[in-house]
Image: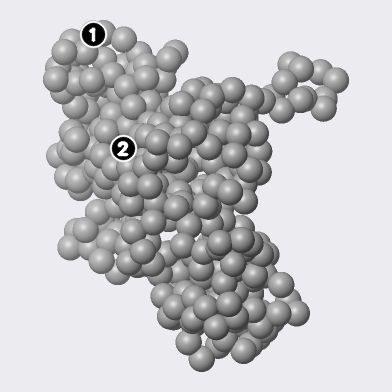
Amino acid sequence: MKIVLQNLTKKFPNRSKTGPKEVVAVNDFTFEIPDGKLIGLLGPSGCGKSTTLNLLCGLEKPTSGSIFFGDDDVTKVPAERRGVGFVFQNYALYPHLSVRQNIRFPLENLKGDQKLSKQEMNARAEEASKLVQLEGLMERKPSELSGGQQQRVAIARALVKTPRVLLLDEPLSNLDARLRLQTREEIRRIQRETGVTTIFVTHDQEEAMSISDMIVVMRDGVIQQIGQPQEVYDEPDNLFVAKFLGTPPINVFKGYVKGEKLFIGDEAVLDAKGVADQEVWATIRPEGFELDENGPFSCALTGVEVMGRDISVVATHPQCENVTVRAIISSRNKVAVGAQSVRFTLVPEKVFLFDPQTEERICVQ
């Protein structure tokens, strides 16, 4: 099911006596979601991603704009008639019902031509349970399940009505690190098997990048960038996107371009062909450093963290916005732990320049 959002805007009244009368949660959101894809809505708390999800499912009415499911305009269609499956952050399972009853519950409310017999409802519940690998747990209560199993019950309940669209609102935030990894892999598997168009809301960029076909980065209700996860990571449109994506975060330096050379402090660290003389934000991904005792860029060494396959070099620099500079290098490299400084050569494709005023990307030839 293709989803089209056209100039979608949602405003809430401002309860504060100071400031504007209205708060814009979603601002002129226009985007087409291809059929059968998994889209990650990504951004910090308060950026409007959950509001967008609520608009899609009908829990909120837009202030302006339109929502299309395929060729159908569903902007004013009630939530129960949109054919949407919704998985909430807190699972919202009924504690007094068994797993089977929780999964079957949405089917019990069907009426008219859609009404199912008890045998049909049980068969659909069994089918959904197999999809999320809950066989053998159907008679348990939610309190007898792990967090990951409860999450799978919530997903099965959303899928049992064979929805046109599946919406997931921060579904992994209540799980520990190992379960999060396992469950996000399950979500991706289920989405591929069902082929249902899925929108996955999260503030965790690693989650969004690992399972999404495309990601939408949001800030203050406005789309910042749309694209395939690796494309957005490798080619950020602005400083916000560059800083938001990546673990460890990108290193941000005050720099300037002079004579088509990028300077950080007094050091000319990289060519900047085609860039006029100006001040810039110079950002370097952690993997954009190569250890080189004769390299053009120097930092004060504060520590070395061995992480198995990689080494994290922790340093400082007076022009760095971050508290520390982090460089991720191969474990084949040897860093003298007692050294006072460390020198690097920079990988050009891992260095991005941004205008200090607009924070938009400056392209280097």
Q: Are marks 2 and 1 in contact (CB under 8 Å)?
A: no
**In front: 331, or 302?**
331
- Residue 236 percent across, percent down from the top left: 32, 32
Looking at the image, can residue 223 be seen? no
**In front: 13, or 230?**
13
Q: Mark 2 or mark 1, which is nearer to you?
A: 2
**In front: 283, or 172?**
172
Mark 1 residue crowding within 10 angstroms, few (<14) / some (14–19) / many (20+): some
Q: CA distance from mark 2 to mark 1?
A: 29 Å
Residue at image coords 62%, 30%: 62
**In front: 118, or 259?**
118
- Tell me the amino acid under the disc marked 1: Ala
Q: Is residue 92 above or below residue 329?
A: below
Residue at image coords 19%, 21%: 364
- Residue 36 percent across, percent down from the top left: 33, 51
Residue at image coords 41%, 20%: 359
- Residue 90 percent across, percent down from the top left: 65, 62
- Residue named by callout 1: 276
- Residue 111 percent across, percent down from the top left: 63, 62
73 left or right, relative to 145? left
Query: Between disc 2 and disc 1, whose residue precedes?
Result: 2
123 left or right, relative to 192? right
- Residue named by callout 2: 227
189 left or right, relative to 83? left
The C terminus is located in which quarter? top left
178 left or right, relative to 228? right
- Tell me the amino acid under the disc marked 2: Gly
Residue at image coords 41%, 75%: 131
Q: Is residue 246 above or below residue 92?
A: above
